[in-house]
Every structure is written in C-alpha cells, then in structure tokens.
Image: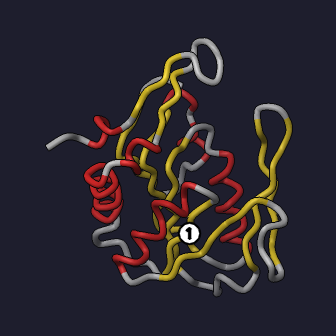
Amino acid sequence: MKKLEDYVTSILDFPEEGIIFRDVTTILEDPDGLTIAVDGVRQMLEGVEYDSVIGPESRGFIFGVPVAYAEHKGFIPVRKKGKLPREVLSADYALEYGKATVEIHKDSIRPGQKVVIIDDLIATGGTIEAIIKLIEELGGEVVKICFIMELAGLKGREKLSGYDVESLITYEGK
C-alpha cells in the first residue's frame, strides 16, 4: 500500500522560483489517499479526550468534518472575516504582505470545552495561533492540533509550543 506522501504532488517553482508547492488536492482526489489521511488523523486522536473538532476555512473543513463525523463529534468552523452569520469573535494574523482575519461564532464554544484543531498544513503557524487565541478567549481548551502536512523549515511549530502538535507528513524545507 502506498504511503500518504505518495499522494502529494510536489510542484517546483510555484508560486515563485525556488518554492516547492505541496499540493494536498491530489490526496483528496484519490479514495485511498483520502482514507489514509482521515484515518491517520483519527489515529492521532486515539486516547485524546475532546468534545469538538475545529477546522479553519477551507481545507480544515475538508479534513475536519470526516473526522468529526467518524468520531461522532461536532464540527466548529473558523472562517474568514464576514462569512459567519451570528455574533463572532475575531483575531488578526500576519500574512507575508499584510494581515488577515479569522472569526468564530461566539456561542460555538462553552467554557471548559475541549477541542482539537485539524488543518491541512502548518507553515508559519500564524493562522492556528490566531485560532487558539479565539478558542481560549471563549474559555475553550485546545487539547491537540493535527495537520496533514508540515513545512518544518518555516518553523510554525515554534509558535504553537506548549500545545500537542502532530503532522502526518513533515517536509524539512519551506
């Protein structure tokens, strides 16, 4: 059987020269790749006590929802600014050129609620760092953070020190 890494397409010089883009969509396109990814995250969560899965827009939805479904947990979306219809809490995070904002419904997390965050990729860690801030401001507790892929050269894990972070695939470069 193939390994999860075998389902990732690496594209040289995208979006600019010297960058290797790791394309997660080829995992999704193959039923075996998708199964390996979702089952791999579920294995990361064995023995972890949690109430809900949180996934950032948009690829966190793709991997978080099937895990939540299989584990009979609720799914809480974190979205880009202006996309959620109820009262929200917002957090900004840095981009290479500027900033972005993520939001969560204020009533989606109860004090003491234990959550896991699932996303496709950790690069600089800024998005997840902002999401953790939102969760903790609402009184929630992040008990695990799961990624499909990690770009270790961007040192995003350092921003998440103090949290249980795990990735199915780790690429040493950027």
The answer to whether 121 is drawn above or below residue 22 in the figure is below
Quadrant of the snapshot with the N terminus = top left
Q: How is the image coloured?
A: secondary structure
Residue 73: x and y in percent read 44, 82
Residue at 40% from the left image edge and 41% from the top image edge: 26
Q: Quadrant of residue 104?
A: bottom right
- How many numbered discs, if any? 1
Residue 157: x and y in percent read 53, 42
Query: Quick one: 32 or 49, which is closer to the camera?
Result: 32
Residue 141: x and y in percent read 57, 73
Residue 74: x and y in percent read 50, 82
Residue at 64% from the left image edge and 24% from the top image edge: 15
Q: Is residue 41 left or right of residue 81?
A: left
The answer to whether 21 is drawn above or below residue 8 in the figure is above
Q: Is residue 42 left or right of residue 89?
A: left
- The residue under label 1 is 54
Amino acid bearing label 1: Ile
